[in-house]
Structure formats: structure tokens, C-alpha cells
Amino acid sequence: MFGLFRKRIGDMLPGRVLTEREDLFCYGFDASSTENIPSAVVMPVNTREVSEIAAFAFDRRIPLIPRGAGTGMTGGAVPLRDTVVLSLEGMNRITDIDEKNMLAVVEPGVINYTLQEKLEEKGLFYPPDPASMKFCTLGGNVAENAGGPRAIKYGVTRDYVLGLEAVLPDGRVLSAGGKTYKGVVGYDLTRLLTGSEGTLGIITKIFLKILPLPAETATLLCTFSQPDDAAEAVSRITSSAIIPRTLEFMDRESILAVENYRPCGLPPDAGALLLIEVDGSHTAVSEDADRIASICSALGARIRVADDIYSKQQLWDARRAVSPALYHISPTKINEDIVVPRGRIPDMLRSLRAISEKYNLTIANFGHAGDGNIHVNVMTDRNNKDEYRKAQQAVRDIFEAALRLEGTISGEHGVGLTKKQYVGMELSDVSIELMKAVKNVFDPRGILNPGKMFPDSRR
Ligand SMILES: Cc1cc2nc3c(=O)[nH]c(=O)nc-3n(C[C@H](O)[C@H](O)[C@H](O)COP(=O)(O)OP(=O)(O)OC[C@H]3O[C@@H](n4cnc5c(N)ncnc54)[C@H](O)[C@@H]3O)c2cc1C
């Protein structure tokens, strides 16, 4: 079956079907510590090629795994055995930046930061900024409905997708939405495909809403001796009338990990810190920054204002280094991204401390505290079987705590492979049945990114 695929698709796309083991290995993992070797990797460069590959695979029941840059945290792009990876990295053109209608049209393989840079040159702005933005693709962002630090003010990827084109598993091409800011004709297939993790269609074109670049930004580093005070500051800021554009949290373990990995001048004696940014007009920025500084000072924080581009960049480099720094310490750490209502962050941090003590495991926490999204990192070594078992029990306790606080088990990393056995903790049987029925309508042969998203059997 794969021999015929390699021959026929290889003839169609000369040099763009990979079959050597060392090449296949590069497409067998993402950032989730799960891996598998696919049977082939195919690299189309336009919608017609994607459609022909899908139709061929559909007829022969060959499973296809759409893939962007492979930075996903839950194994969504990781192939299972006997599957073909369909890499969208060659579809990487920004086809239009339409200033008149304030939208951009892109192919899925465009790197998020490439679009950000191109827009900034024109005084324009695309807010979604996952910490991986320098290397993840916009197609992957749409498939995961990625968020980022600026989500607290500007929302997540879904809020910017006006429309898209996707190839269905049988090769048909679907267009949903388009260039208008509004549209209510029929079901909202754009929103359904956004966040569908490559299980319903292969996204081949994206229409994105864009904004004018804010006139000014101010960046504050607020350092607290106690994590509870930082959590309290988050609640006070979000319940005041200020909407910062970022409100990022790092606990002591995350700060120390970054300073040991790539020293950035973060205070090593801090119990926790908040990296806060405000944007807007000159007056609004200075008023908001002053009010935030006084809220944090009242809780005993030391405040540092980054007053030039270099020091702003240095602080953001430090924030973006947290995930790699923690991987450096513990390559098989378990990384979760729970969300709780913003006012419940202090409760969630207390629960995390209790779970860390219960299992005697280090848990490092950081993330987008402004929207209640905490990246919880259980530091563990998979080769130590007893410890790893404890870590998995800790993960279940963490999810239970988040759900008890009326939260969710994932804010932006999705379900993929690594979280599928926990989905039933949050979703009802009715929801799961309906979602499976939707999957079946789009993909009756179950060949698009199989084995992801849904639990293997209900627990
Ligand atoms: C250091 C680091 C920091 C991160 N920070 C953040 C963060 O702040 N916020 C956040 O949301 N995420 C974050 N992530 C996770 C990850 O970067 C995002 O999920 C990103 O959107 C994945 O993009 P990708 O191109 O790497 O997709 P991949 O990992 O290649 O794929 C992800 C999923 O999308 C599907 N997919 C990819 N392209 C397509 C397509 N064209 N059509 C259909 N399906 C497709 C795949 O099948 C898979 O299920 C981080 C990851 C790392 C390693």
C-alpha cells in the first residue's frame, strides 16, 4: 500500500516525498515527548496537490497526518504507525496584506513571526503571539486555536480567523468565511475547523483580521517575595478597569530555571514575578502603567520599568525561555496548561503546592495568568518508573483541582495524543458522542489524523 503511495505521489511531486529513515525521523515527534516514525512524508506546495494527495489516500485508506512546524505540546502532529505525514511547511506565502480591508491572506506554512514582522513594517498588527511564534506556523496556530501572552486583551487565534480554505479527507476543497468581518449564512464552519487539531480538514488558506499597531507600549517587571501576593495582584489588576495587553506569571522554579539556562537578569531571590505590558496612546499607557505599579507596590512588589527596546526584548526573551529551560532540566517533564477563572488563580496555586507536597515532586508554574491560564510543569524523569507513576497521578489531581474551580484542562495546547484519556473528565458523554459524529461526517473513513482527540475507551 505504501509502496504504491510512494511511487504514485513520488511521480507527482518529484523530490518532495521523503522515505529515508533519517528524514522520516525528523517528522516523527513534536514538543510533547511522544514519537513514532511515519511511513513517508509528503510536501505539497499548493491546494491542488494537497487535494490530489488526499483523494489518493482516501481511496486506499491511507492515514494522513497534517503537520506545520511540529511545535505542538500534545502530540497532535505525531504520526501513528503506518501513516503518512503531510507537511505544510512548503506552503509558506503571504499572498496578500490588504490594508484597505484590514486583513491578510496567508498559506498555512507561514511562520507566525514572519507575518508579525511584515505587518509591523506597515504599521499593522496581528495580536496572537504564542511563545513559540518565531518557529510555529499559522496553520498550526489555527488548527490548535493558539493563544499567547496578548490574549488577555486581544483574544486568541479564533478571534482573527475570518475564513479559511481546507481540503477534506476525500480531496474535496471547502471554503468557509472569507474577506468580510461578518457573515451568518449557515453553520460557522470556520470556527468548527479552528481548533480541530487536523482531524477534520487540511487547512490550505487562511484569511486573518489585522489591526493598527498600537502607538506605544510600556513593559513592567514586578517582583514579589511571595507567589500568593503575585496571584493577588493578578486578581486586583484584572478586576480594576485596566486591560493590560500581557499579564504573565513566573514562579520561583521557572525564574531559577531561566537564570541557570540563559541568564537574563531576573532576580534569583524572587518568590514570583509578573511581566506586564500595556499599550495604547501615550497618555493611556502612562496612566495604566502607574496604576498597575501602585497595585503591585501595595502588595510589596519591586517594580522595574523596561525603558528601551533592548530591555523589553530581554524580558520577553526570558519569558520565552521558560519552556526550553525547564526541558533542559527535565526532558521528560509533563507539561499541562490548565485554565481557571481569573479570580481563582490564588486557589489554584495553593492546590498546586499541596499536590507538589503530596507526591514530593517539583512543580514549576508559569504562563498567561491574566486569562487564568497556567502552564503546570511536573518535573519528572520517565526512566524512573515509580516517580513517573506518581507524576501521572499528580496530573490527574491537577485536572481535578482545575475542574473543581470551574476551569478547563487545556487553554491552548489542545488534546492530541497526550490528553485524550482525560477528555472524559471535562466533557459529558453527550458532548463526546456529538463530536465523534461530526468527525464521522467530515472523515467517514477515519483517515485524517486518526487516534487523536478522543479517548480510546471511556474511563
Ligand atoms: C517553547 C514553546 C512555547 C509554546 N508556547 C505556546 C503559547 O504561548 N501558546 C500556544 O497556544 N501554544 C504554544 N506552544 C504550542 C505550539 O507552538 C502551538 O500549538 C502551535 O500552534 C503549533 O503550531 P505548529 O506549526 O508547530 O503545529 P504542529 O505542531 O505541526 O501541529 C499542531 C496540530 O495542528 C495540526 N495542523 C498543523 N498544520 C495544519 C494544517 N495546515 N491543517 C490542519 N491541521 C494542521 C496538526 O495535525 C496537529 O494536530 C508552544 C510550544 C513550544 C515548543
Image: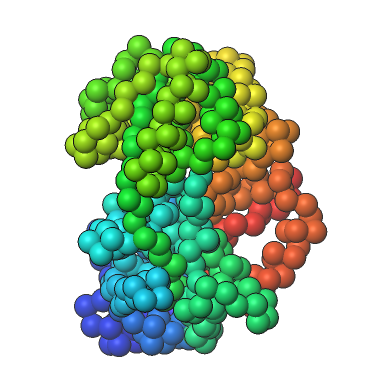
- Can residue 329 be seen in this snapshot? no
Q: Give the quadrant of residue 401.
A: top right
Q: Classify residue 343 as left or right of residue 388.
A: right
Q: Residue at x 75, y 65 (%)?
A: 434
- The mark total stands at 0
Q: Quadrant of the N terminus?
A: bottom left
Residue at x 41% of width, y 87% of height: 52
Q: Which of 160 and 38 is in front in this view?
A: 160
Residue 131 lies in quadrant: top left
Residue at left offset 66%, top offset 53%: 455
Q: In which quarter of the image is residue 231?
A: top right
Q: Nearest the camera: 288 or 68?
A: 288
Left or right of residue 328: residue 357: right
* Residue lying farthest to the right in this orientation: 430
Front residue of 129 and 388: 129
Q: Which residue lies furthest to the front in this view?
A: 283
